[in-house]
Image (spheres, helix red, strand yellow):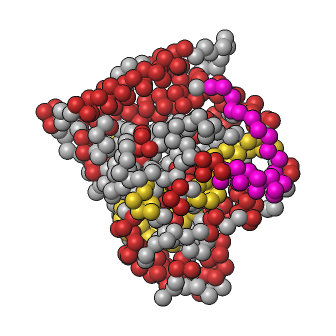
Amino acid sequence: MKTSPQRMRRRRFVTLLALGGGALVSSPLSRAASALTGPEPRTREGRRAPTAAVKKEIGTQEKALAEQLKTIRGYELSPGSPMAFAFRPLKSKRGTRR
Amino acid sequence: MIGEDVLYLSVAELAPKIRSRKLSPVELTEAYLDRIGRLGPKLNAFATVTPDVAREQARAAEREIAKDRYRGPLHGIPYGAKDLLATAGIKTGWGAKATKDQMFDKDATVVRKLREAGAILLGKLAMVEFAGCLGYRFADASISGPGRNPWDPERWTGGSSSGSGAAVASALVGFAVGTETWGSILCPSAFCGITGLRPPYGRVSRAGGMVGAYTFDKIGPLARSAEDCRLILQAIAGPDPDDASAADEPVRLDGGRLDPSRIRGALIPLDFKKTKGAEPEVKSRFDQAVADLRGAGLTLTETSLPEFPASEMASVLINAEALSTFENFYKSGGVWDLKDPYAPYQQEITRALNGADLVKAWRMRAVLQEKMTDFYARYDVIVTPNFMSVAPSIHEDLNKSLPYADPVGAVGNSCGLPSIALPCGFGKGGMPVGFQIMGSPFEESTLLALGALYQSRTRFHRERPPLNA
C-alpha cells in the first residue's frame, strides 16, 4: 500500500515506553509506569543451567534460524528494490530564525 | 435463571431483546457469571473474573435502556477481553508470572470503546504468556494453565488467545476480544469452532495493548458469527490519536447485501496428501465449504500464492521485534519465570541474526506487499483452509502435533491482510474444523459479508460443545 505524503506528515512516531522491568505498551499508558511491578532483578547465577534436552532443542532452533537466514541471504532483491522505511528528518519545533 | 439457549445467542440476536427490554442486562450478566463460576476454571478460560465491574456496568446499562438511551447493538452485552489489554484498576497479567500482578491506570482504547458502546466487562481472558511472541512448545505455557477446549478439555484451545476461544465456544461470554501477531485469532477460532476476525493491520488501535511484535500485532473479535464480528469491529475500529499506527481508512461496515457473483475468489487448496500432520477429514470439510460457497454464487478459481519465502521472512521479523520488546525481561531475568523452557534462550539462539539480515527482511516485506497488491488486482478474496488438523492434545509437544507450516498466515500477517475464520464442520474425535477467507487491506467488509452469506446457508457456527455445566 502506498502512503501519501499527506498521511506521512500526519503520522508521528509512537513513543514506546519501557515500563519498569516490563516490556512495551503503547504510549497512552505512560502515566501507569509507576503502577507496573517489574520482575525482580536476578544475578547471572540465578539462571537455570540448560538440561541435555534443552541444549538439544536450542541446537534445533539454531539450525532452524540458520535455514531461515540462508533463505533471506539468498533472496535476490531486484535492482531498484525499495528500502524498508522512508526516513525523514524531524523539523525543529522552534521554527527557523531569520 | 436465564438458560443456556439464551447464553449461546449471538450479539445480533441478544441486542433486540435487550433493546426491547425483554432481556435484562443484569440478569444476563448474572447468568454468564454463574456459568463462568461453574465452567471457567475447568477450561482455564479466565485470568481474572470481574464480577463487581460487570454488575455495576450491567446496572448502568439497564438504567440507560430503561430511559430509552440505547447506545447500539453492544449495549448490555457481556464480553471478555484478552489479558493483554489494559484495564484500569484490574490486573493485566499478559499470561506470564513476571507480570501477573501488573496494574495500569488507564483502559486500552479498545476497552474504552467497548465501555462507551455499553458492553459489559466480565473479566480478562487467559492467554499464552507474552502472547507466544518468545515462542512456546507446549499448551501450558501460560500462568492460567493450558487452554482447555470446550469440545474436549483434554485438547487445546489454540493460542495465544486461548481463553477467548474457550469462553466464546462455551458461552461464558457474549463475545471476546483477542489479538493476533501470527495466528492467535485464527487458531483458537478454528480449534474451538467459532468465528474470528483478524482485522487489517491498523484497523483497530493497539493503544494500551501489550506489544508483541509491533508491526504484526492486531486486535480483533472472536464471536458466534460473522455478523457479530461486524458489530464488534464497528465499535472498536477507527483512528486513534493514541496510536500512530491506527489507520484513518474509512470504516465501511454497513452490513449491506453482497452479490457473490461479483466477487473474484481465489481458491488456494493446500496439499493435504503431502503435508505431515494434515488430516483428510479436514480436507473433506474444506472441500464441502468450497462447494457451499460456489453454491451460494461465489466464483472460485484455483490458483497459488506468489512464490516467496514469507514464512522465513515473517519469522525473522517477529523474532527480532519480540526480542526488542521483551529485552528488559532478559536483562532482569524475568524470562526465567516463563513456563516455556526455551524462551529464556531466545537471545542466544538468535545470535546469528545480524542487522543486515533484518533490513533485508524488511525490504523483502515490501516486495511481498507489492506482489500481493498485484495478486489482489486479480482477485478480491482468498479462500483457503485454516488449520490442517483439529485441536491437538494439551499434553503433546506442539511442534510434533502441529508439524506443518502456515504459508497463508505468513503472507497475511506480513502484509497486514484481514482474514475471517469460519467453522465448517467436524473432524477427528468430533472436533471442530474451520476455513478462512482472506482479503486485501481494509476490505474486511467483503469478508464479513461473505462469512454472513456462508453462515446463512450452514449451521456449524450454531453447534454447541457437549459440556456438563
Residue B347 in the magenta stretch? The answer is no
Vertical side of B311 occupied by B117: above or below: below
- Residue placed most toward the observer, B298 or A86: B298
- Looking at the image, the residue that sits furthest to the left is A45
Location of the C terminus of chain B (image quadrant): bottom left
Which residue occupies 66% across, 51% down? B284
Residue B179 in sight here: no
Q: Would residue A71 be found to the left or right of residue B434 on screen?
A: left
Using the image as rendered, state which of residue B261 and residue B78 is in the foreground.
Answer: B261
Residue at (37, 47) in percent of width and height: B396
Residue B370, located in which quarter of the rendered image?
top right
Identified at 35% across, 22% down, the residue is B351
Residue B174, by quadrant, is: bottom right
Q: Which residues are magenta?
A: B285-308
B434 above or below B51?
above
At which x and y percent is residue B43? Answer: 39, 64
Residue B36 position (above or below residue B159): below
Compare residues B187 and B313 and report the one nearer the observer: B187
B395 sits to left or right of B282 = left
Residue A36 image position (x, y, % from top left): 30, 51
The answer to whether residue B261 is left or right of residue B255 is right
Q: Position of residue B292 (x, y in %)?
A: 76, 56
Residue occupying the point 29% across, 29% down: A56
Q: Is residue B306 magenta?
A: yes
